[in-house]
Image (spheres, rainbow, N blue to C red):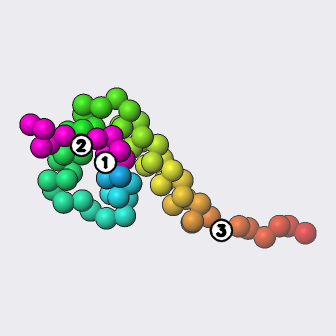
């Protein structure tokens, strides 16, 4: 079963990679198994997803002209 184990470092790499592209099915499965067994990586994934949503909102922000 060692084949299906990845390190937290590899998990972090995959978590950030999935923001840019869809991961292959096997990779998604291995990542999901790691996230189910690890305490820290799901927290990291939530933080990354929060930052990604915040950046999307920031990119969509349009500054309004000041009332003079």
From mark 3 to mark 1, how far is it between C-alphas? 37 Å
From mark 3 to mark 2, how far is it between C-alphas? 41 Å
**63 vs 59, nearest the viewer:** 59
Mark 3–mark 2 contact, CB under 8 Å? no
At 12% from the left edge and 43% from the top edge, which residue is drawn? 3
At 24% from the left edge and 34% from the top edge, which residue is drawn? 36
Residue 62 is tagged as 3
Q: Callout 1 environment at 10 Å: few (<14), some (14 to 19), or many (20+)?
A: few
Q: Which residue is mark 1?
A: 10
Q: Bounds of the magenta span?
A: 1-12
Residue 68 percent location from the top left of the image: 90, 69
Q: Is residue 64 above or below residue 40?
A: below
Q: Does residue 32 appear in this view? A: no
Mark 1–mark 2 contact, CB under 8 Å? yes
Residue 21 is tagged as none
Q: Is residue 11 magenta?
A: yes
At 45% from the left edge and 48% from the top edge, which residue is drawn? 48
Residue 62 percent location from the top left of the image: 65, 68
Residue 17 percent location from the top left of the image: 35, 58
Magenta-colored segment: predominant secondary structure: helix
Count of residue discs: 3
Q: Is residue 28 magenta?
A: no
């Amino acid at each position: 079963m060692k084949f299906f184990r990845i390190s937290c470092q590899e998990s972090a790499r995959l978590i950030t990679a999935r923001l840019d592209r869809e991961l292959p099915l096997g990779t998604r499965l291995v990542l999901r198994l790691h996230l189910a067994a690890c305490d820290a990586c799901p927290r990291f994934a939530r933080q990354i997803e929060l930052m990604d949503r915040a950046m999307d909102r920031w990119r969509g922000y349009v500054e309004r002209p000041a009332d003079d």
